[in-house]
Amino acid sequence: MKTRYRRRRALAALVVVAALAVLAGLVWLILLLARGAVGGPDMRGLENVRAVVLGADWSGYFAEAHTTEEQKAFLESTLDEAAALGANTVLLTGRVDEDPAQVLFRVKGKDLPVATAEAVSDNDRLFSKFDPLTYLTKQARERDMQAALLATDEGGQPVAAGGALPAWLEEAAGDYKLVLYGLDEVSAAALDEARAQAETLAAETGETAAVKQPLLCYVGLGAEEDAPALLRKDADPALLAAACQLEQDKGLVLGELGSLLADGDAATVTLRFLAGEALPDLLAKEVPRTLAFVSPEAGATVYTEQVYLIGTSDPDTPLTVNGQPVERAGEMGVWGLAVDLQMGGNDITAVQGDATATITVTRASYSGGSSGAARPDGSVAAATGQKLRITQPLASLLGDYTNDDDIRMTAYEGAVATVKGSVSFVRSGRRTHAYKLENGGYILAKDCELLDASTPDAAFTGAERTTEGNMEVFTFAGSGTPLYTHTWEGNELTLTFLSASFTGEMPADLGFGGATVTAEATGEGGFALHFVFSDADPLWGYHVRYTADGTSQILLKHQPKRSDADTGPLTGVTVMLDPGHGGTDMGAVGSSSEAFPQEKDLNLAEALAAKYRLEQLGATVLMTRADDTFPSLGDRVKMLNDAAPDFFISVHHNSTNLDKDVSGLTGTECYWFYTEGKPLAEALVSRVTDATGRTARGVFYNYFYVTRSNLCPAVLLETGFVSSPVEYQSCAGDLGLWAEGGAIAQAVLDCVPG
């Protein structure tokens, strides 16, 4: 009996063991299926991959104690936040708190999903605890999203295709069936160069320098080589979107989740830039890839010991100039070379294969200057008390009549003032006059006309307010177009009108919340209006406009604001773009051939790219020219004053005298006149250099015609140097033009208050 009982017990035990084995197998299969372990990585045919990176700051959440429910909620919110940014993919770095020894993979027996790399192989043990990564991939599938891994080495640095991968990383990718992404070789080299530059800068300055991230490209590693390539340039929608649109069949990385949540613009702007149809063509003509001299012209005469040659060539064929090999960079074959000149004729020959090109440049001695007394320009002295009228679209009220830099105020066409004295002096080799006005400033004779002595002072008896768009317009009752000066500090604006009286009252309601105005006579026979605005409704810009019928108006602009309209954050914002030069004015030195894209062509192409991007953000864009025409400087100022935009950007490209080796002179700079334009200038230089990788040369004060407006921030942008062959090719290439255009749009957005 005991033997039979023992046999029954043994049989029962075997049945139990078998049952447990079957159950364990089922559980194991279920776990594998839950992790997607059957089959390859789950890309599910997603097109247009839009990814966000879950970096060490995100993984750091799991370095602290949290309940399973808290972890689930955190993972679900992660996917919801990524989806809200427009992402359909999350990329894990697998790192925790920047510690290369800690990785985010489940290990049996630990309460937290943090372990050393050596323990990753334990992550598939039976009956393991809650696994965040498994839960993340499951929740992603339910949202039609996906997860993937970014490859890093044992030190936490990105791994390039073909590089050695940590064993734990490959095992984890296989266990969880995640596509593994690494940098392509070009991106890896660019990142190494950026790190080296940062280290050099740190050594020179003694300060820690941040790595300026280049445009990166991630590719699938190993069995996932057919995964869609992903482009990445954090916080730079201009270059990222342009590269993605110009390089077909590539997805992109919007950036790190934490940074994107902190800066809501980057993902929104990138996706808006990516919307719509294929990018339009910008340049009407291309750089010819044939051997030719572009500058100087054949038969040119110069007066310097050197001349910098610029030419075109086949980029794939060796080039010599007077027997000297010429190195070229870029895909267009543009080249430059400084050569020494002898007195007299200098024959210069370029050879490329069977092709030759020759020019003769003559070096001569310069005999400048002139002798004899300065000839008068026809101007005359004015009688004290005589009136004058400004005849130029824009003139300068100078503190020192011999110094064009000493500008007290900009005077506009039609303004009338009273002369208090005349000065005769020599200017540019001609004898002329300057007229002293009531406030001590001087107007040059070339900018005005003298009026009859009986011309009366302006006299106003009040003002009426109307509204034009986002601008309040105050039209004076009475007659006259008096010259004015101004001071504008913070929320206080004072307009002082010369040779004018005001006997009425300004409207009680100025159209600005909390704003006030007071009027008082001045000692110089004029009057001043003192406006005070509130922080809640500040002044954005102003202008005094003189109408054709002799009426004076004050224009006060409201501050533009970002919009939450579906049409974009710049809805309601007006930008005027001014492509410099045009028509018979080719612009900066660099090309004597119409077949070669000149500065005027690059200016227009860049402005058209900026217009396209600005409109994608909802802005209304006006152009001073949209083709190869030449509006005068006066025409451009008139367009600005008539349209009263919220921003004015004159688009140019830089150059220098070609009398030395100028190949190393590169970079972006921007000019402002009134301080209200300086923030826009700074934003433009920052955005353009980030998008193009060019040197940031800085922002500078200067009295360019088109920057002298108080109506709105007005600047002149020099995007890059056309005298540098390398920078010229960047400025003339599709990627460079679209990066510049997108950067201009971002800079405007940066300057629009929320």
Image (cartoon, rainbow, N blue to C red):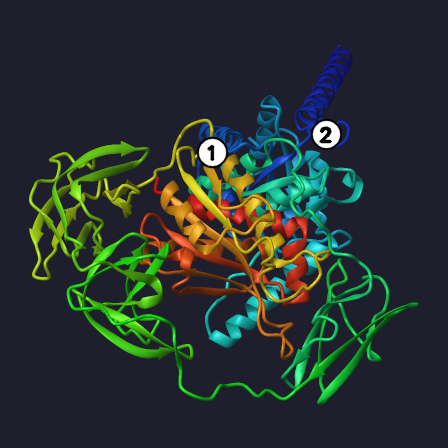
1 or 2: tag closer to the N-terminus: 2
Give the percent coordinates (x, y) of residue 609.
58, 44
The residue that appears at 78% across and 41% down in the rendered structure is: 225
Measured as percent of width and height from the top left, residue 209 is found at 50, 65
Closer to the camera in the image, 424 or 605? 424
Q: Which residue is mark 2?
A: 37
Identity of the residue drawn at 29% across and 43% down: 547
Q: Amino acid at mark 2?
A: Ala
Name the side, left or right, on which 636 lies relative to 36: left
Quarter of the rendering containing residue 66 = top left
Q: Residue furthest right?
A: 354
Task: Judge by depth and name the residue closer to the eye, 639 or 67.
Answer: 639
Q: Quadrant of the C terminus?
A: top left
Query: Label 1, label 2: how many angstroms apart (C-alpha)?
Result: 46 Å
Decide which of 744, 373 is in the foreground and name it: 373
From the viewer's perspective, is residue 264 above or below residue 443? above
Q: Name the element at disc 1.
A: loop
33 is higher (above) or lower (below) than 418: above
| 417 displayed left or right of 275 | left
Residue 561 in view (yes/no): yes
Q: Which residue is mark 1?
A: 618
Residue 62 image point, x, y percent: 49, 41
Residue 653 pos. (x, y %): 56, 60
Query: Which amino acid is tagged 1?
Result: Gly
